Amino acid sequence: MKKTLFVHTAVALAVAAPLLAQAESQLVNGTGTAAANLDLRVVIPRVLFLGVGTGSDTPLATNGAIDALTFDYSTNPLDVGTGAAAGSITNTGPAPAGATIPVRVFGNNGQVTVTSSNPAVLTNGTDTIPFTELSVSSNNAAFAAPTFGGGTSLPTLAGRVTNQTANWTYSYANNTTPAFGTYEGRVTYTATMP
């Protein structure tokens, strides 16, 4: 008997459970109006995105590709140290080509700050080229390129949302005459948001 009563009670609760989760209702007998409320919600996640080169093409997703920009004097070696442009400038990322790299920043919780960090020199074994020989500029005043060595950029925002794209163009001053070789260094851009 107890088992049967328990089973009947469990079945009754299971059948009634969906009724407990229903929206508000009001029953009026006779004249008058009935009212019922419904709460609506929209959930917007906190998002911070920074894409440089290939990563700027993704639709706010992580992309692990690191592009490489090369200033190559193989075709004009006598111009090394004269301030002349490299005979060839290539990058492994998306268009635009040459020394111009596409970038994008998106954040939805206030002012985004983009900073750069890099070593003091580009290295080729023990030989070096100072990072001060390199510079970068932006085609969008609303998203300036941070200078090397800890520079910062404050992209323009609308309300509390930042959504800016730009093309950053890099240049090599070519004011020193280093020994032959391939000199490498990496700049890391970091976006922060409150």
Image (cartoon, rainbow, N blue to C red):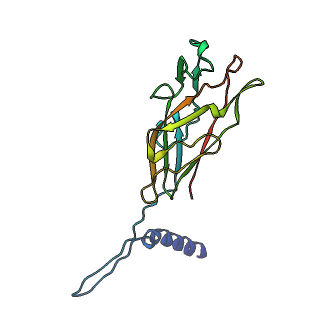
Split into 4 quadrants, where in the image is the N terminus?
A: bottom right
Q: Which quadrant of the figure has residue 121?
A: top right
Q: Is residue 44 above or below residue 171?
A: below
Of all residues, the one furthest to the right in this rendering is 126
Which residue is drawn at the image coordinates 55% and 70% (left, top)?
7
Comparing 61 with 95, the one in front is 95
Of all residues, the one furthest to the front in this rendering is 82
Of all residues, the one furthest to the left in this rendering is 31
Which residue is drawn at the image coordinates 61% and 24% (left, top)?
174
Comparing 51 with 169, the one in front is 169
Residue 180 locus on image (x, y percent): 69, 16
Split into 4 quadrants, where in the image is the C terminus?
A: bottom right
Residue 168 locus on image (x, y percent): 50, 36
Comparing 132 with 165, the one in front is 132
Q: Is residue 2 above or below residue 30?
A: above
Which residue is drawn at the image coordinates 61% and 13% (left, top)?
78
Which residue is drawn at the image coordinates 47% and 25% (left, top)?
97
Residue 114 locus on image (x, y percent): 56, 47
